[in-house]
Image (cartoon, coloured by chain):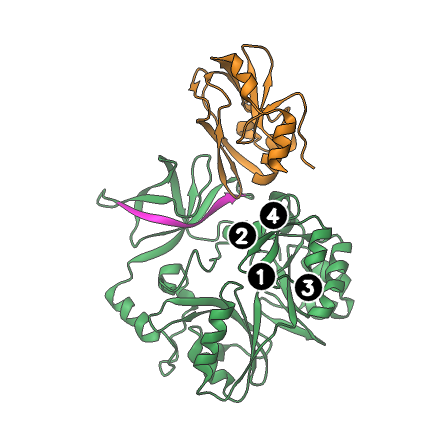
Amino acid sequence: MDNIPQTLKYTQTHEWVARESNDVWTVGITDHAQKLLGDVVFIELPAVGDKVIINKEFGVVESVKAASDLYAPISGEIVAINESLVDHPELINQDAYQQGWIIKIKPQAPEQWEQLLEAQAYSQKIS
Amino acid sequence: MEKSTPLYHKHLELGAMMVPFAGWLMPLHYGSQLEEHHAVRNDVGVFDVSHMRAIDIQGMDAMRFLRQLLANDIRKIPIGKALYTCMLNEQAGIIDDLIVYHLGDNAYRCVVNAGTTDKDWEWFLKQAASFEVTLTSRDDLSLLALQGPNSFDKLAQVLPSIKDTLQALSSFQLLSEKDLVIAKTGYTGEMGVELMIPNKEVAAIWDNLIAQGVRPIGLAARDSLRLEAGLNLYGVDMDENVTPDESNLSWTIDLRDLERHFIGKEALLAKRQQGVLWQLTGIMLLEKGVCRPDMTVHVKDENNDWQQGKLTSGSFSPTLACGIGLARLPIGSFTQVNVEIRGKQVPAKLIKPPFVRKQHG
């Protein structure tokens, strides 16, 4: 069974989003996504200060078998990246929701939180 | 509707992710491709490769037939030895690559790729028409590959009666034990054996190996292991549009007997005379990233002109922790090599395969 924490929100493209505050949203990929990808071996991250646009690619996660784009859940500015993933991309497989976080975004329009999928809706989508 | 091997339920019990492959439902991995890959390099793993097909060739013309059908020369292998070879069409394109086993007087067995089985079988039948040979498709046999530095120890525990003969087995040699054929061959670059087992007996041997701590290995790790070993995969690194010379397989062409005709020989020699245009070689990324099939490779020649080739295979090497691949490039030597990954030129270097050499056995 896939782990889908109730406290998080989700995108159609299998990113999870945690609202640390109105100014900081943390983004990663879901347990379901990491299982589909298999062993993650490389991640292409944006730089702090880069602008991201909702539903547009902000990076790439590569597993042994495939490369997969990462999509921003909201427009905004990158305020942090998980640098441990550069040397330990396997953290995404081991702990997708905590140590495997990918970026933190300062959102342009925090009210877009309401447009993201609730855990139940995401669960239905992948079932 | 995909076919399944006699071990299908065993794979499910072991938690395998099953995927369609060449008309079969096969295990991709049992949890982690990387862990399975390392298990084969450092310990031992077992692969169900029963989707591959054994074809027996028997009869007074068996040798004469195979000397015409195959580009390598089976006359050089005595009973109890195996040979790797290509089977060519009249244009010297590769119909398949296979291993032929010399089982006894006038008795040979070819093991062919899963995806080419039907095509191969038709080709065998067509070419055999003028020979005194009997062809038998051995659907009653399952195939296992036991690979890794501890594979002989584990097999000796499961089949103690062959312990001594097993230890004495040399590369590409085989032994028979009742209905079982065991050959020191494999597709990982590690020490190991491939076993041909009657379908009704394979589950017991599989269970016994798993009980001894042998790890089941899926197709995903099979691919990364074979790529590290620099071994071609049919359908990507070679096919009917390329010759062995263009596929790093010139060493498998045996031309020593000038009297021997084999299918594709004239075309191959003619192409050699015109000059071979392409080579297949190993490539390794010098920066982080992963090579993928079909990526463009840019190479700078000695005149500072840039030329292009393509990756045929590409993956992440778990052993070397970098991107590796096989690339089809123009003939020549190059001073600079880049792989184009998502529009970016990533520096790389050319390497004569294998990428990883076995450290054991």
Quadrant of res B68: bottom left
Graded by Cα atoms within 10 Å as few (under 14), some (14 to 19) or many (20 or more), the crowding at tag 2 reads many
Question: Are the residues under marks 1 and 4 on the same chain?
Answer: yes
Range covered by the magenta-colored residues:
B307-317
Q: Nearer the viewer, mark 2 or mark 4?
A: 2
Q: Which chain is green?
A: B
Q: In whole angstroms, how far apart are the C-alphas of marks 4 and 3?
A: 24 Å
Amino acid type of the residue that numbered disc 1 sits on in the rendered structure: Gly
Q: Is residue B164 visible?
A: no
Amino acid type of the residue that numbered disc 3 sits on in the rendered structure: Pro
Q: Nearer the viewer, mark 3 or mark 1?
A: 3
Query: Which residue has dot 3 on it?
Result: B6
Subunit that carries the residue with mark 4: B
Query: Which residue has dot 4 on it?
Result: B37
Q: In whole angstroms, how far apart are the C-alphas of marks 1 and 2?
A: 12 Å
Query: Which residue has dot 1 on it?
Result: B186
Q: Which chain is orange?
A: A
Amino acid type of the residue that numbered disc 4 sits on in the rendered structure: His
Q: Closest to the observer: B168 or A76? A: A76
Q: In whole angstroms, how far apart are the C-alphas of marks 1 and 4?
A: 14 Å
Residue B261 drawn above or below residue A62:
below
